[in-house]
Image: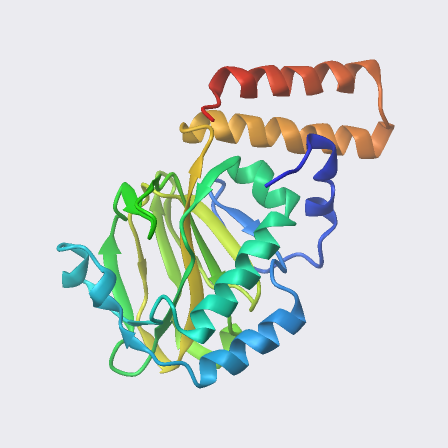
Amino acid sequence: MRAGVDDLARFHLLGRPIAVDVPAVSELLPALLAPADLRQAQELLARAPWADGRDSAGRQAREVKNNQQLPHDCEAATAIRGMVLRALDKSPPFFSATLPLRVFTPRINRYGGEQNNYGPHIDNAVRLLPDGQRVRTDISCTVFLNPPDAYDGGELTVQHSYGEQRIKLPAGHAVLYPGNSLHQVQPVTRGHRLACFFWIESMVRSDEQRRLLYELDMNLLALRQQHGESPETTALTGTYHNLLRMWANT
């Protein structure tokens, strides 16, 4: 992942505002997937070999997990995983919000019918990649793969210090939220909810420090858009990188 502080103005210019109430501890990635990628993903998912999602869950999660998941190496999973990783690599907002060190291999799930919800849970702190490398789950990400009018229910519900938040986004949009959050997927009562999910290990482990860096980055972009480059923005950019140098582990 490569992006500079100066490249992130696109985040403020992407698309129309989204009519969804998302907490300050979460971040949206609007239109992460292009329409052509979404169409291909939906065609692949229509004939995909779904399996019981509990097969990949830990002991406690199996008690509340009731969904379907694609086998890791099937055609649809491989293709959609590639789409998502390429989109992340080209997304300056993703880089700024997560400061990624490692990304866990994206997975694809489905809710609907008899397998229609995932009860309250906190994700495992560490996940194992196929190559044996460990990924600390600092940040969780969900990419919505079909439109919200295709199903009823299915909101991603995240608990945080300000209360409960329900998130249901347009197809191709993604949401980032702290990996240590208590969260669940509400029951799907009509249709199917399709999504891609994964975790990010950040160079900056602390949510608070990462938030400060992100806010500084976004305000620097706004200042440049309004007033252009100046000695003050140059100095603040230096402050950003000095803080990142102090807090980052690579």
In the image shown, does 156 or 111 lie closer to the viewer? Answer: 111
Up-down relation of residue 21 to residue 225 (above or below): below
Residue in the image at 59% along x and 60% along y: 19
Looking at the picture, how far across and down is residue 26, in whole percent? 48, 45
For the N terminus, give its image quadrant. top right
Looking at the picture, how far across and down is residue 97, in whole percent? 55, 39
Residue furthest to the bottom: 47
Looking at the picture, how far across and down is residue 202, in whole percent? 45, 35
In the image shown, does 248 or 12 lie closer to the viewer? Answer: 248
In this rendering, position of residue 14 left or right of residue 77:
right
Up-down relation of residue 135 to residue 154 (above or below): above
Up-down relation of residue 216 to residue 173 (above or below): above
**Protein image colouring:** rainbow
Residue 144 visible: no
Looking at the picture, how far across and down is residue 225, in whole percent? 82, 35
In this rendering, position of residue 4 left or right of residue 132:
right
In this rendering, position of residue 63 left or right of residue 110:
left
Snapshot quadrant of residue 4:
top right
Snapshot quadrant of residue 18:
bottom right
Residue in the image at 18% along x and 55% along y: 58
Residue in the image at 65% along x and 65% along y: 34
In this rendering, position of residue 32 left or right of residue 8:
left
* Number of on-image labels: 0
Residue in the image at 73% along x and 13% along y: 235
Residue 45 visible: yes
